[in-house]
Amino acid sequence: MPSGSAPGSPGSPPAGPPPVTVVVGEEELLVDRAVSAIVAAASPPGARDRPPDVEGTDVHDAAAAGLAPGELTALTAPSLFGGGCVVVVRGAQDAVKDLAAELTRLAAAPVPDVVLVITHSGAGGAKGKALLTALASAGAARVDCPVIKRFGDRMDFLRGEFRAAGRKADDGGLRALLDAVGNDLRDLAAACSQLSSDTEGVISQAVVARYYRGRAEATGFTVADRAVEGKLADALEQLRWALATGTSPVLISSALAQGVRALGRVGSASRSKRPEALAAELSMPPWKIDRTRQQLRGWTAAGLATAHAAVAEADAQVKGEGTSAGYALERAISTIVAARSHG
């Protein structure tokens, strides 16, 4: 999530943003939100919910790669008609040498009534890093928007979205939403907005499942969970629903493979270690390690070997060797369930 200086603070009068801010990171949604917040803070009171130029604040938004030498100076020049302006320069890691120098000069000597916002991916090799260092040395404020990769951070992102909407979701609901929607932040933010508007009460797993009409329950991972737990009827029901709603057989086969592999990895790890201590070693979130330990009941080494073979065969079938992907997956699920029961 964005970190760094933010315009204003609770309980204080609205304050304008710093004259120059660099927004660093590759998480596009968070970068766009940070830029929008700065533009809104630069708008006069009473105009923050309207286009910024309505009340005299002009906004110029340009890609660094498309700015010709001297063009930035023209954009930041004082207006003959007065009023402030905001200049957003995106993708500064692609700035040519002259533009990078121009950005650094503006950071060191900001133009009155001009708010300059610079976005930078944080990448770009030595050239990109040198510009970031120069901007920091010149006094530019910085907001970091790193890519959200960890499961726990995505859960925190969802909690923040619901909190901002005045809603609450329990952990089961958050996990179900990740299963249903995926990991893209824009999709997740849109889903949070929809659920906040269209549902009531605590957003739970059941609420998410009802809202997505089975999408959350019929993912390949849920099919895999029911199979490794030995629930044949449930697994086949979820499989048929997943296929009927357009889930790719390859994704279901992959989920089955991941489910069986997780059993093997967790089963071979120390049973005395807490899930939190094993998370880094197994590259799995603690909650998944805990759930996999529960799923291990009834499994033997011989049974896992049989399940691995069944998944490998199904994977080959759904990738072109068989005539019916659905039949291949049904047979794999039946074999997995039997392997758990009989070893």
Image (tube, grey):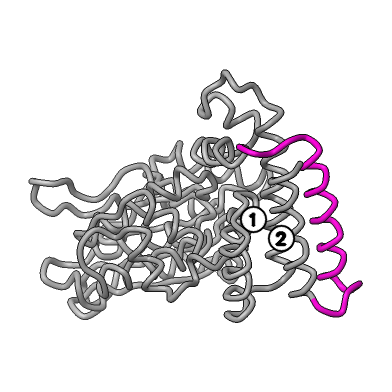
Check the image and name the residue furthest to the top: 272
The amino acid at mark 2 is: Ile
User: Of residues 50 and 75, which is closer to you in this image?
Assistant: 50
Q: Does the magenta portion include 231?
A: no
Residue 75 in the image: x percent, y percent? Answer: 41, 70
- Label 1 crowd bin: few (<14), some (14–19), many (20+), radius 10 Å: many
Residue 102 vs residue 9: left or right?
Answer: right
The amino acid at mark 1 is: Ala
Is the residue 306 above or below the residue 187 in the image?
Answer: above
Which residues are the magenta region? Answer: 297-324
Is the residue 287 above or below the residue 83 in the image?
Answer: above
User: Of residues 100 and 44, which is closer to you in this image?
Assistant: 44
User: Of residues 9 and 72, which is closer to you in this image?
Assistant: 9
- Label 2 crowd bin: few (<14), some (14–19), many (20+), radius 10 Å: many
Mark identifier at residue 227: 1
SS for callout 1: helix
Q: Which residue is mark 2?
A: 333
Quarter of the figure that contains the C terminus: top right
The residue that appears at 69% across and 53% down in the rendered structure is 337
Q: Does the magenta portion include 322?
A: yes
Mark identifier at residue 191: none
The residue that appears at 62% across and 51% down in the rendered structure is 230
* Image mark count: 2
Residue 105 in the image: x percent, y percent? Answer: 46, 49
SS for callout 2: helix
